[in-house]
Image (cartoon, grey):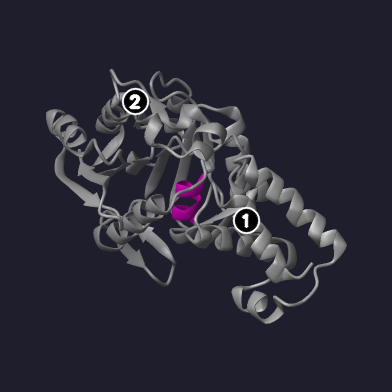
């Protein structure tokens, strides 16, 4: 079988699940993963024959794709903010909008904090090392991306799930960054108190992409997400959809510096409610930001 015939086979078998452009993108991911092909390589070699051993690999992936399993879980990896991450069904697949949140944090850091370029150090105006906490870290994508680009900060990452933390630790090793991982429940925090004995100061930044999809929004979601990604990292009750934002905001009031920053990724439908929650707790300089699709998706505030 030629590569162009393989492409046609994928389009035929996956047409009910994906649009044609999406199928082509999936095939290119596999070509890169198995054969280190770029798009240009594929265009140059689409008339070439595929070896029988490689064909077996592609057909095995096609079978899983037909069953609705996301390509990232099949490959066991994905990319986030230019970095490679291991992913399995214990963690959410990192999304592009979360990359936008990381970009916002890095942008704010470059203006709010001094940068000692010679020492490659990010410091506050009071020359204190910046402590960052990522709550609900999952794969560790936010914490690791921040640490990679702010190497002299101290980054802490919290999650309730042991299997998620195991994956996050592997990703920290993969990307050669040192992060302090904490297993705890932010709704009833216990373990996190132990880290304050080693902190030089309170946190400069607290960031979270917590569960925020309401149960009644499930019909709007892609079947692949519902069938494969961890529901505990996605869903909240219709009755109390801001439960994690409330808990994290309360934690931030006690544990952020006076000039510290709280960042949230939010449900696109809950921007006003999240702002109202923060205002009621006397947070200041609250800013709501849209993602590239024009959806309300990120919030920044000061305690």
**Residue 153 makes an appearance in the image:** yes
Q: Which dot marks residue 244?
A: none
Q: Residue at x 86, y 60 (%)?
A: 53
Q: Give the range drawn in magenta.
A: 140-147
Locate the N terminus by quadrant. bottom right
Q: Which of 99 and 143 is in front in this view?
A: 99
Is residue 9 magenta-colored? no
Along the line of sight, the residue nearer the viewer: 87 or 113:
87
Within-10-Å neighbours for mark 1: few <14, some 14–19, many 20+: few
Q: Identify the residue position indicated by label 1 in the image.
A: 12
Q: Which residue is drawn at 44% across and 67% down?
A: 119
Secondary structure found at label 2: helix
- Res 267 → quadrant: top left
**Under tag 1, what secondary structure?**
helix
Dominant secondary-structure state across the stretch colored magenta = helix
**Left or right relative to 177: residue 222:** left
Up-down relation of residue 49 to residue 245 (above or below): below
Residue lying furthest bottom in this view?
A: 44
Query: Where residue 182 sits in the image (x, y, percent)?
Result: 51, 32
Residue at the spot x=53%, y=37% of the render? 181
Q: Earlier in the sequence, mark 1 or mark 2?
A: 1
Q: Kindly identify which residue carries mark 2.
A: 216
């Amino acid at each position: 079988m030629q590569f162009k015939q393989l492409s046609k086979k994928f389009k035929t078998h996956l047409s009910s699940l994906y649009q044609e452009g999406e199928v082509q993108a999936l095939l290119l991911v596999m070509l890169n993963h198995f054969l280190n092909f770029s798009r240009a390589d594929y265009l140059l070699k689409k008339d070439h024959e595929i070896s029988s051993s490689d064909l077996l690999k592609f057909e095995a992936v096609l079978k899983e794709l037909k069953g609705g399993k996301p390509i990232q879980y099949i490959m066991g990896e994905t990319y986030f903010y230019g970095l490679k991450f291991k992913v399995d069904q214990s963690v959410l697949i990192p999304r592009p909008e979360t990359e936008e949140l990381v970009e916002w944090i890095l942008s704010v850091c470059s203006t709010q904090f001094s940068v000692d370029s010679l020492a490659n150090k990010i410091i506050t105006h009071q020359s204190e090392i910046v402590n960052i906490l990522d709550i609900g870290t999952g794969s560790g994508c936010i914490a690791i991306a921040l640490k990679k680009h702010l190497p002299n900060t101290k980054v802490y990452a919290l999650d309730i799930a042991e299997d998620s933390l195991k994956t996050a630790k592997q990703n920290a090793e993969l990307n050669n960054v040192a992060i302090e991982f904490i297993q705890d429940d932010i709704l009833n925090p216990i373990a996190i108190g132990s880290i304050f004995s080693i902190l030089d100061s309170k946190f400069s930044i607290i960031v979270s992409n917590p569960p925020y999809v309401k149960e009644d929004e499930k019909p709007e979601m892609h079947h692949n997400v519902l069938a494969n990604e961890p529901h505990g990292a996605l869903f909240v009750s219709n009755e109390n959809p801001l439960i994690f934002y409330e808990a994290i905001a309360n934690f931030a009031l006690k544990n952020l510096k006076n000039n510290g920053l709280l960042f949230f990724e939010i449900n696109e439908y809950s921007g006003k409610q999240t702002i109202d929650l923060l205002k009621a707790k006397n947070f200041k300089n609250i800013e709501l930001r849209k993602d590239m699709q024009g959806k309300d998706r990120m919030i920044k505030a000061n305690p």
